[in-house]
Amino acid sequence: MKKNILIIPGDGIGQEVTTWGKKALEKVAEKYGHDFSFDEAIMGHTAIEATGDPLPENTLNKAKSSDAILFGAIGHIKYDNDPSAKVRPEQGLLKIRKELGLYANLRPILLFDELLDASSLKPEVLKGTDILFFRELTGDVYFGEKTRSDDQTFASDLMNYHRYEVERIAHKAYQAAQGRSKRVCSVDKANVLETSRLWREVVQEVATQYPDVETEHMFIDNAAMQLVKNPKKFDVVLTANLFGDILTDEASQIAGSMGMLASASVGDGTGFFEPIHGSAHDIAGQDKANPLASILSAALMLEIAFGLKEEAQALQNAVSQTLKAGWRTGDIANANTADEHRLGTRQIGQKVIDFLQ
Ligand code: IPM
Ligand code: MG
């Protein structure tokens, strides 16, 4: 199979982790006889420094003409501490999501048994958890009108949804549920928000087209609580942009670390694959970052963008074997991890490649 893959490392640890996502893809190509070619482009703080624009035209053009995109991370503390900055790294990510029509963000909470003790939650609560989040990605308060009064004492972000935006992601979630345990939990705040009442109405309608799938509606506050109380009760979770952003960070602790979670953003155009973690400037460039989420994002690319299920599984198995052999980066190590099992980004990345071989 011949594919053009665009790598956008982004900011902070993005460069280090995508290096290993790319190496994993190269190894898969070599082993299974595929022809993957790679190009690279800038985005975020890195792009602001180079061009003044968090998403330069050239990056967007390359993105549109590639077959899939592997993205690293975005953000810089400089902006986090300066809320008045007009140009911000995150604008690049939001714009590319919008421009590529990536309305569905799939975030699987993949639990490796070897990491049951890496979470702050009890292993018996976690064991057996397997959740697939469908987070709406191009609507909601993220993209609604923003205002600030002239005297700077008032601000607003408009939360809004169109019926079609809810419909299309709901269909994706129900279709996925049909191939899993046939349960969808739709999360909203319909007891308070009008957007959530529209959301619930549309989901109820879509649900009638999937009579084999069981639907549960849950309020976001309750869902946030249930997720740590009994994560096994969830299978496919369908939710809006902001709720999904928050719930998936929470859910990452089920998998042991943010450094383990991959995601796929899909929709109208080129698919976009990225870890859910941020740019982690505090450890950037120190060979400390966990590259497994980037490698698992590459696996999602193989499966979802290219339909290469066997290759994706092989890559996931290589990650699993690396963990079984006891290798850990700092974020997934604990007090019982022997010093010689604690590895840097490059070493653990190489272990995965070796297992893939
Ligand atoms: C995510 C991130 C982004 C988001 C930020 C970096 C804009 O937190 O992908 O979850 O809020 O969507
Ligand atoms: Mg987030």
Image (cartoon, rainbow, N blue to C red):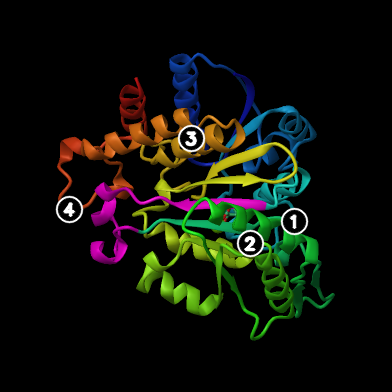
Secondary structure beneath dot 4 equals: loop
Residue annotated with mark 2:
210
* Front in this rendered view, residue 183 or 126: 183
Q: Look at the image and give the residue range highlighted in magenta.
A: 104-128
* Front in this rendered view, residue 61 or 12: 61
Which amino acid, mark 1?
A: Lys
Residue annotated with mark 4:
335
For residue 251: magenta? no
Which amino acid, mark 4?
A: Ala
Give me the disc on residue 299: 3
- Nearer the observer: mark 2 or 3; the answer is 2
**Label 4–label 1 contact, CB within 8 A:** no
Considering only vertical position in the picture, is 60 above or below 146?
above
Residue 323 visible at all = yes
- Work out which quarter of the rendered image holds the N terminus and state it: top right
What is the CA distance from the residue labelled 2 to the residue labelled 3?
29 Å
**Is label 2 within 8 A of ligand 1 (CB to nearest ligand atom)?**
no
- Work out which quarter of the rendered image holds the C terminus and state it: top left
Considering only vertical position in the picture, is 305 above or below 142?
above
Circle nearer the N terminus (1, 2) = 1
Circle nearer the N terminus (1, 3) = 1
Q: Quadrant of residue 322?
A: top left
What is the CA distance from the residue labelled 2 to the residue labelled 4?
47 Å
Give me the disc on residue 86: 1
Give me the disc on residue 270: none
Q: Position of residue 52 (x, y in %)?
A: 75, 40
Report crowding for label 1: few under 14, some 14 to 19, many 20 or more residues within 10 A (C-alpha). Answer: few
Considering only vertical position in the picture, is 338 above or below 201?
above
- Nearer the observer: mark 4 or 1; the answer is 4
What is the CA distance from the residue labelled 1 to the residue labelled 3?
36 Å
**Label 2–label 3 contact, CB within 8 A:** no
